[in-house]
Image (tube, rainbow, N blue to C red):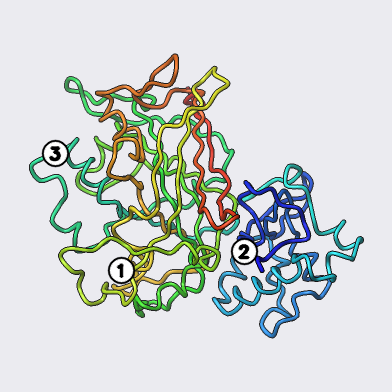
């Protein structure tokens, strides 16, 4: 019999009992932040469930991890605690369990309408790394900037390439993004300086690190999944003109560090497991430390919509899928630590732009408009890159048998550069 919650969940909801993603919220403005899980149109306050003594398993019974201001302490405990919490919550929310269902006072305190809460960053991000793991994206970018003869650098097929990002400018979905200012390529002798003229979105997802590793002790690729709590949607906004001028020889800097938006709900790997699928065949075979016994991605349908400034309607511009990634999450994490680098709970590992093989599956405007050469039609207007007032929204969802496991939305609006 299919698992069913005593809380009514719409069939199209991203948050049925099969999902139960984790986030951090304020139930009313000015109140203390607290961890919760999404169930239908409600947020279940985990601090109230813990206070009522309903986390009664051996790992979480005496833990204060759900009375914290973020999820770092919980994700640090590890997979056994995650599984215990998931089993407890699915039991408490099931239609057959009376402990919460028949306790009106506890239901009143612990189930908060989602449209009333303020969502916050779910973890305190100490470090943030952004990978470059989509072969289609790498090929398109290389073709645009270097030509079709040799678009993908030789090292790309041997190592999951990444750069160290800026954790301080990671923001929660719904936060406005101020158009960055900076330098661009000179048209004469002097570089351009001013607001970015090529502001772009990047369709990404990001892994939330659970338990870290000690400095000097790499994580085995076949054990790397135990260090990944779950995934969020991520928009790693990019100022293409600033980046193009600065990135040689040390890579992205001001063209990326002005803002990175993440969705509020972390969908766990356990919730995603029914949607696991084979990762692409890697040729040449990776070096032994990256060779996985089981190499898998997840079938997560991804969409991007743009609502142009001054318009009421959003326009679908991209349909992609997480399963297009060439390098897997576990390979990314194992490679990150192979030199002894220590990851910590709450660290964020971005996938890089997730583009598919077809033009309608490209994951950024750089590819969709071919660096502005082919403007994108949005009903009565068009775009080469983002304009002030444009709002970009990502969605991600796995389609199960009669239910969804979704991520909600990841959105942000561009507002004018400061003078």
Where disc 3 sits, the SS reads: helix
Q: Quadrant of residue 85?
A: bottom right
Q: Earlier in the sequence, mark 3 or mark 1?
A: 3
Identity of the residue drawn at 51% across and 30% down: 391
Residue 146: horizontal and vertical position, in percent?
A: 13, 39
Residue 335, labelled with which disc? 1
Count the marks.
3
Hey, which quadrant is residue 106 in on the image?
A: bottom right
Q: Nearer the viewer, residue 173 or 343?
A: 173
Q: What crowding class fits label 1: few (fewer than 14 Cα within 10 Å), some (14-19), or many (20 or more)?
A: many
Residue identifier under label 2? 71
Give the answer, above or below, for where 215 lies relative to 228: below
Q: Residue furthest right?
A: 105
Cα distance in 3D space between marks 3 and 1? 27 Å
Q: Residue 386 at x, y = what percent? A: 41, 27
Q: Secondary structure at mark 1?
A: helix
Q: Nearer the viewer, residue 350 or 42?
A: 42
Q: Which residue is mark 3?
A: 146
Question: Which numbered disc, 2 or 1, marks the residue that appears first in the sequence?
Answer: 2
């Amino acid at each position: 019999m299919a698992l069913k919650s005593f809380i009514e969940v719409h069939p199209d909801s991203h948050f049925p009992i099969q999902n139960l993603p984790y986030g951090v919220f304020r139930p009313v403005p000015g109140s203390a932040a607290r961890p919760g899980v999404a169930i239908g149109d409600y947020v279940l306050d985990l601090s109230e469930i813990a206070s009522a003594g309903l986390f009664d398993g051996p790992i979480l019974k005496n833990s204060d991890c759900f009375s914290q201001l973020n999820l770092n302490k919980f994700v640090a405990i590890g997979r056994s605690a995650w599984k215990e919490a998931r089993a407890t919550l699915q039991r408490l929310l099931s239609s057959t369990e009376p402990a919460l269902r028949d306790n009106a006072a506890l239901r009143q305190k612990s189930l908060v309408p989602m449209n009333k809460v303020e969502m916050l960053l779910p973890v305190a991000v100490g470090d943030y790394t952004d990978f470059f793991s989509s072969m289609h994206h790498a090929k398109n970018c290389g073709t645009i900037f270097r030509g079709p003869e040799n678009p993908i650098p030789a090292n790309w097929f041997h190592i999951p390439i990444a750069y160290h990002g800026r954790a301080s400018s990671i923001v929660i979905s719904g936060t406005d993004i101020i158009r960055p200012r900076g330098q661009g390529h000179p048209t004469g002798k002097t570089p351009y300086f001013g607001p970015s003229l090529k502001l772009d979105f990047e369709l990404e997802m990001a892994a939330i690190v659970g338990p870290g590793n000690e400095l000097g002790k790499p994580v085995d690729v076949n054990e790397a999944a135990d260090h990944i709590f779950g995934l969020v949607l991520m928009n790693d906004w990019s100022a293409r003109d600033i980046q193009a001028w600065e990135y040689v020889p040390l890579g992205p800097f001001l063209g990326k560090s002005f803002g990175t938006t993440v969705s509020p709900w972390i969908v766990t790997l356990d919730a995603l497991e029914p949607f696991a699928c084979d990762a692409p065949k890697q040729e040449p075979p990776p070096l032994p430390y990256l060779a996985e016994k089981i190499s898998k991605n997840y079938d997560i349908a991804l969409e991007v919509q743009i609502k142009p400034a001054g318009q009421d309607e959003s326009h679908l511009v991209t349909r992609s899928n997480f399963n297009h990634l060439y390098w897997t999450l576990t390979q990314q994490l194992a490679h990150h630590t192979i030199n002894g680098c220590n990851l910590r709970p709450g660290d964020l590992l971005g996938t890089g732009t997730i583009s598919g093989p077809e033009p309608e599956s490209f994951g950024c405007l750089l590819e969709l408009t071919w660096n502005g050469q082919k403007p994108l039609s949005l009903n009565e207007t068009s775009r080469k890159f983002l304009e002030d007032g444009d709002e970009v929204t990502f969605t991600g969802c796995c389609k199960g048998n009669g239910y969804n496991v979704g991520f909600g939305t990841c959105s942000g609006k561009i507002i004018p550069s400061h003078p």
